């Protein structure tokens, strides 16, 4: 597991808080899958996460986004998407 960069850590904290995860934010592997294996999120968790990201960073991740699978593939991929699409700091 690699160390989290500041944006990954911020997103990990948002995930832990929003989804009431029973894990420490800093212990989430940025390369591990978010969905099913890895962190073990389900489709409802990903929907909730997309709402939190939308409110915090000012852009929407819609279910018909052609990159949806990649965006939620890992914490690192989500952070990379936020870094390029965010409209709020």
Image: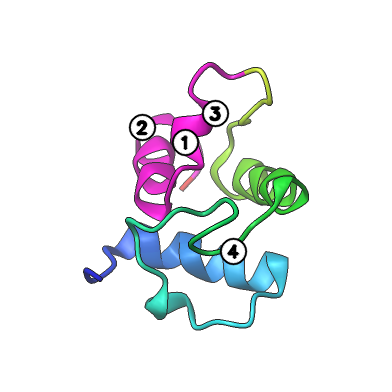
Q: Disc 1 designates what residue? A: 71
Q: Nearer the viewer, mark 4 or mark 2?
A: 4
Q: CA distance from mark 3 to mark 1?
A: 5 Å
User: Which dot, 4 or 3, sits closer to the camera?
Assistant: 3
Of pointers 2 and 3, the one earlier in the residue sequence: 3
Q: CA distance from mark 4 to mark 3?
A: 17 Å
Magenta extent: 65-88
Q: Secondary structure at mark 2?
A: helix
Please count the marks in the image.
4
Of the residues tagged 2 and 1, which is closer to the observer?
1
Residue at screen point 64% across, 57% down: 41
Q: Which residue is mark 3?
A: 68
Above or below, 84 relative to 49: above
Whether residue 86 is visible here, answered yes or no, is no
Mark 2 is surrounded, within 10 Å at the Cα level, by few (under 14), some (14 to 19) or many (20 or more) other residues, namely: few
The span from disc 4 to disc 2 (Cα, nearest Å) is: 19 Å
Q: Which residue is mark 4?
A: 15
Instruction: Please provide percent x and percent y for residue 27.
Output: 39, 79
Residue 70, magenta (yes or no): yes
* 27 lies above or below 54: below
In three-dimensional space, the C-alpha distance between marks 2 and 1, rounded to whole angstroms, equals 12 Å
From the viewer's perspective, is the residue at label 2 or at label 3 nearer? Answer: 3
Residue 4 image offset from top left, x and y in percent: 29, 67
Secondary structure type for disc 4 = helix
Of mark 2 and mark 1, the one earlier in the sequence is 1
Residue occupying the point 31% across, 64% down:
6
The 10 Å Cα crowd at callout 1, few under 14, some 14 to 19, many 20 or more, is some
Q: Specify few, some or many for label 4: CA neighbours under 10 Å numbering under 14, 14-19, or 20 or more.
A: many
Which of the 4 image quadrants contains residue 10?
A: bottom left
Q: Are marks 4 and 2 in contact (CB under 8 Å)?
A: no
Q: Nearer the viewer, residue 58 or 52?
A: 52
Report the disc number at residue 84.
Answer: 2
């Amino acid at each position: 597991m690699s160390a989290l960069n500041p944006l990954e850590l911020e997103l990990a904290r948002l995930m832990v808080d929003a989804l009431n995860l029973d894990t420490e934010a800093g212990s989430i592997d940025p390369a591990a899958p978010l969905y099913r294996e890895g962190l073990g999120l389900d489709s409802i968790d990903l929907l909730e996460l997309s709402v939190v990201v939308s409110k915090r960073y000012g852009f929407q991740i819609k279910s018909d986004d052609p990159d949806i699978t990649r965006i939620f593939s890992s914490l690192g991929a989500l952070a990379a998407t936020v870094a390029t699409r965010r409209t709020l700091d």
